[in-house]
Image: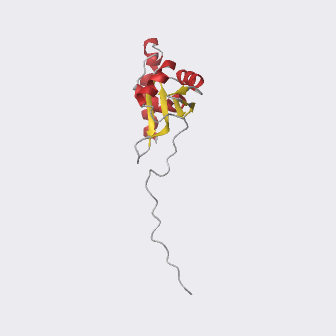
């Protein structure tokens, strides 16, 4: 534990002088793709009521009028490989996502009225592996 504290102090001592440099304040030492996962919930929107004919490309085009779309994903049914009627749109900033929420909610897209809301965090229910419960119990006749 003491080793971790000393490493943290050394790192802080090396980085602190650069934080006062105005040229380095605007640059990030973290790759932008990593920032998306950190702030993803606030800039990721759920889009419901999509037509089966809506593609990820047309979803991107429709929402790009509100800001920079980083990703547009339509959820597909595994068996039929058709749209389930909803998807997600990720924006570069929270402001753009809020603008898209207010402008696109209730609008028609490919003949269907869509509704837009902030995406909720994904819940992991055990990683998709079934729970082994063992063989069924046999009933004993008395």
Q: Is residue 29 above or below residue 6?
A: above
Relative to the observer, which residue lies in front, 35 or 70? 70
Identify whether 24 is placed above or below 123. above
Please give the name of the residue rendered at 55% of the width and 37% of the height, measured from the top-left corner. 120
Give the residue displayed 52% in from the left and 29% down from the top.
111
The residue nearer to you, when weighing 20 against 59, is 59
Q: Position of residue 109 (x, y in %)?
A: 51, 27
Q: Is residue 78 above or below residue 72?
A: below
Evaluate whether residue 9 shows in this view.
no
Q: Point out the residue furthest to the top here.
A: 22
Q: Is residue 72 left or right of residue 107?
A: left
Question: Quarter holding the C terminus?
Answer: bottom right
Residue 58 visible in image: yes
Q: Where is residue 79 shown, x and y percent of the image? A: 41, 48
Q: Write down the quadrant of residue 7 in the picture.
A: top left
Q: Which residue is painted at 49% across and 78% down in the image?
A: 138
In front of the other: 120 or 51: 51
- Number of numbered discs on residues: 0
**Residue at left offset 43%, top offset 55%:** 129
- Quadrant of res 117: top right
Q: Position of residue 121 (x, y in %)?
A: 53, 39
Q: Nearer the viewer, residue 52 or 120?
A: 52
Q: Position of residue 65 (x, y in %)?
A: 49, 18
Rendered position, 18 above or below 123: above
Find the residue positioned furthest to the front. 111
* Colour theme: secondary structure
């Amino acid at each position: 534990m003491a080793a971790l504290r000393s490493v943290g102090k050394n790192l802080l001592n090396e980085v602190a002088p650069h934080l006062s440099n105005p040229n380095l304040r605007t640059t990030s030492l973290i790759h932008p793709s990593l920032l998306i996962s950190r702030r993803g919930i606030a800039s990721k929107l759920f889009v419901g009521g999509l037509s089966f004919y809506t593609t990820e490309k047309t979803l991107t085009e429709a929402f790009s009028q509100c800001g920079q779309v980083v990703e547009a994903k339509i959820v597909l049914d595994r068996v039929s490989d058709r749209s389930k009627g909803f998807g997600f749109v990720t924006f570069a900033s929270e402001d753009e996502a809020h603008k898209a929420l207010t402008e696109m909610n209730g609008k028609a897209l490919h003949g269907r009225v869509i509704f837009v809301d902030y995406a909720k965090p994904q819940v992991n229910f055990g990683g998709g592996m079934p729970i082994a419960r063992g063989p069924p119990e046999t009933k004993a006749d008395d």
